[in-house]
Image (tube, rainbow, N blue to C red):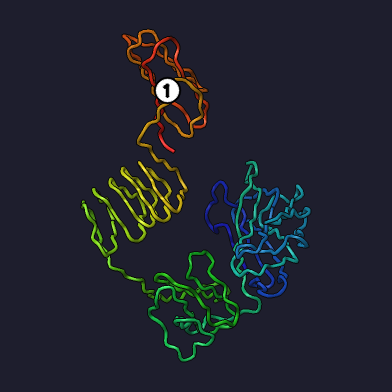
Amino acid sequence: MTTALSKADTAPTATEPLLKHAVHTIPDPLEANLSGPPSPAQIRVVLTNGGNKAVRCTSIVIELPVGTRPRDLAATGQGIVATATTEGWTAAAPDVGADRVRFAFTPSTAAEIITDRAVSFKIENVPVNRAVGVAYPRIVETSATGADTPVARTGFARLPKFPAGTTATFPVGTNLRVHAGEHASIEGLPPAVSVPHNSKVTVAWNPAPGVVRHLHYRDQADGTPIPDGHTTMVCGPLVRETTFTLQTVSQIGGQPVSRYDAFTLQVDEPEYPKTTVANGRFATLPAGAATRITSPVSITKALTVTETIAAKSTLGITGTVTAPGIKTATTDFAGTLAVTGLLTASNLTAAKVTTTKGLTATGRVDILKAASEPLSASGQRTFSTDGLILANAEANSDLALWVTTPVQTFRTHTSEQVGTLIAPVRAQESVSWGVEGPGAGYTFRWFPFGV
């Protein structure tokens, strides 16, 4: 197999290779042993000057991808031998990494000028991995023309890998079909067009020895590999309409070709009585039916739900909500939220929440208190939430009110026998308060922001 990487009759750009790269393999094409040890291979790289100017090449680096993926070439970088088969060029010791093995070749001064003479390199004992696919070895030439300084120019070869011993073309027909239920044998069974919700099915196809197949029906990149000789696979349970796609990889004319056969199966979804509200304002929800809300709805009175409330975005209600369970991305209530079961929300803001089964939240929970708390005439305390301390003085002509936090001390004096002080307080910080001077007629109150 020969792969040319540079354009034949056009001038290369600043970073394109100046030389033409051709890659030959033994065997041709490469073989991937699906069940045994890695298949050994030999790679020969030939570089030629297809232009009308001499090319000065100071190094060639060939890098083979190592790993288990379809786009990797070698199963390991160990044991591979590289030699320069052109006089004047020498090979350095291989540089073996976790995901690649690199071979560097350098010329003598006389050999670095390339005109009409080809330069070739041989890489032997390459252990081709088991993954059928296409590998892309990297070839980097450091080259220039004329008096320019040589720079690194990168190209890639394309090397398909086929199952060892495979020369078969596509079968005449895949005959992809789906049968309801789990079956070891589908002989005589009619194909299914639709199945009930949560059903398992048996997917079947015609046998085709010597090809590589994957079944795609879930959200994954590579599909499910099908062992050689297998003609069925049990899938499910299915909860929605599903398309089964069977990928068959074979070779035609020495190139890998994929064929895709698809079958779409209808899966019945349970239907319940429901009311769909596009956009509306109402005080009483219909009874005895599910309510599906697709846009903002204002509920001004109490909402009682006998089953779970589920909302994909924000659920905002100004009245009282009583429900066994609520699941929503964001809940925003100005009134009372009472849940007899489990409340699950990413973000919750409410004036009052009552739940008998616990509160679970993955985001911030703010439950605002509606009342304040009187404080003593002086004292020290660590509050569990953010809030404000409000101090008031009346009918007292010579009094100083103060609140001390870790950040600063807040202080005010009475003026015309009255005085007011407001001090912000952060949760989990020690705060003290008090007065200076004789007299009475003053109070301290605590206003929490939330718990």
* Vertical relation: 276 (above or below) 58: below
Of the 4 image quadrants, the one containing the C terminus is top left
Task: Report x, y in % for residue 145.
Answer: 62, 46
Task: Report x, y in % for residue 308.
Answer: 36, 59
Q: Nearer the viewer, residue 13 or 204?
A: 204
The reply to whether residue 90 is in sight is no
Mark 1 lies on a secondary structure that is strand
Tell me the residue at 52%/64% (across/down): 221
Of the 4 image quadrants, the one containing the N terminus is bottom right
Relative to 38, 2 lies left or right:
left
**Kind of residue sitting beneath label 1:** Ala
Residue assigned mark 1: 423
Q: Nearer the viewer, residue 374 or 60?
A: 374
Q: Nearer the viewer, residue 192 or 63?
A: 192
Tell me the residue at 54%/48% (across/down): 13
Tell me the residue at 66%/54% (across/down): 115
Relative to 156, 400 lies left or right:
left
* Vertical relation: 75 (above or below) 194: above
Task: Report x, y in % for residue 19.
Answer: 62, 55
Task: Report x, y in % for residue 96.
Answer: 74, 55
Relative to 297, 200 lies left or right:
right
| Other residues around mark 1 within 10 Å, as few (<14) / some (14–19) / many (≥20) | some
